Image (cartoon, helix red, strand yellow):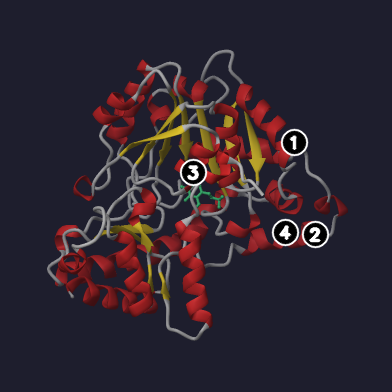
Amino acid sequence: MELSSRVQRISESITLKLNAQASQMAAEGKKIYNLTAGQLPFRPMNSFVDLIRSESDFIKSFQYSPVAGFPELRKKVIDNFCETRGVSLNDAVEGVEFDAVISNGGKHAITNILGCLVDQDDEVIIFGPYWVSYPEMIKFCGGTPVVVNSTPFNVFTPSLDELERKITDRTKIVIINSPNNPSGTHYSDDWMKGFAAIMKKYPKLVIISDEIYYQLYFYDPKPTYFYQHAPELLERTVVVDGISKTLASTGLRIGFTIAPKKLTAVINKLQGQTTSGANSLVQRALCQFDFRQTPTYLEPIKKHLRGNAEVLGAALSENQMGHIWYQPVSAFYYLLDFSQTPVMKRFKNGPGSDRSVAICEELLSEHGLALVPGIAFGQENTARMSLVLEKGPFSEAVELLIKFLLD
Ligand SMILES: Cc1ncc(COP(=O)(O)O)c(C=O)c1O
């Protein structure tokens, strides 16, 4: 069987692979601290679960949904977007109408968008550290990912000068993900202003704003966006959001795309020929759901994330590693920099300059600590750790980690 060159271009998701290995070790009875989680380990709010339950009484909940999603839900998604981001789509750009499409998760939404926009050899700029799937999705569509990277020293803020230097005639899209997976930070309002100014200079560029962690900021100021400074950019902005992260519902697979109708119409066409509409039952529950309950639901979760971040920050500074600490403020990750810690000496030999995979392999096999190697996000010698674990096990994991870093 000959596989397509398209599929051979993409690599396996390291996150899923490591998670599987950690689960396998746990199933064998080994004590594992799984810090790879990309989801909140909490039950969604009762009002939402009750709606799903009550909608399961209707036959319609088990039948095909409209391809783009139920119209009431699409309207609700748009209204919620406008309300939470403080923008109006009605008068953002004269003559441009906007719509929403409901897909099977944010990942599916982004795959649809790239499928509708990327042509062979188009360049798509992504900011490092980047979400693992962006480069692979871009390559699958025939495009070339172009990375504008950042470093732990400036808290993973990509340089806007470098962004401008990397824009070429072939650049089609810039993807921005704030709050960011894996750094657990969001770009500042000044950065967003600067970004808007650059985007205004390049009228052909499309901006994909992946806002899947928007509501999950646990320190002020809250995330802001370039289009709040330049609403005219909404004409070529595609916003991605969903319920996976903020409603702790990764398994329900519901994601949203908000974009000008010119794009949503073709996404509708693509979705209609590939997956059809998303899960009817969950969409019908969401039609009744009051999105304004979300901040209240997230309050104790944010407190928990702040608490775990404090445990980690304090442990690093008490052990003379305060220099690698930065304050995570959003999403639920921290990107740990090994390069300035004593353990790096033990890993100095080997091919290439990245040791994140070797370090994470040893962390898992010898200490039961599962972290995701930073190279998966384009950051050498770092690892992503999730802050969602319960406080007790999280503190134990940090203790083991500190010992390892000092070894
Ligand atoms: C930055 C980012 N975007 C999109 C997604 C996709 O989310 P889902 O497909 O679970 O809705 C994720 C999931 O981890 C993510 O981290």
Callout 1, which amino acid? Gln
Q: Quarter-wise, where is residue 340 in the image?
A: bottom left
Q: Is residue 364 above or below residue 198?
A: below
Is 357 placed left or right of 348 in the picture?
Answer: right
Categorize mark 2 by other alpha carbons within 10 Å: few (<14), some (14-19), many (20+): some
The residue tagged 4 is: 52
The front one of 168 and 32 is 168
Categorize mark 4 by other alpha carbons within 10 Å: few (<14), some (14-19), many (20+): many
**Position of residue 195 measured from the top left corner of the image (x, y, whole percent):** 33, 28
Q: Is residue 21 above or below residue 149?
A: below
Q: Residue furthest top?
A: 95
Circle on res. 273: 1
Are the residues flagged by discs 4 and 2 in contact, CB closer than 8 Å? yes
The residue tagged 2 is: 56
Are the residues flagged by discs 2 and 1 in contact, CB closer than 8 Å? no
Q: Quarter-wise, where is residue 249 in the image?
A: bottom right
Of pointers 2 and 1, the one earlier in the residue sequence: 2
The residue tagged 3 is: 136
Q: At numbered mark 4, what does the secondary structure look like: helix, strand or loop? A: helix
Categorize mark 3 by other alpha carbons within 10 Å: few (<14), some (14-19), many (20+): some
Q: CA gap, disc 4 to disc 3?
A: 34 Å
Of pointers 2 and 3, the one earlier in the residue sequence: 2
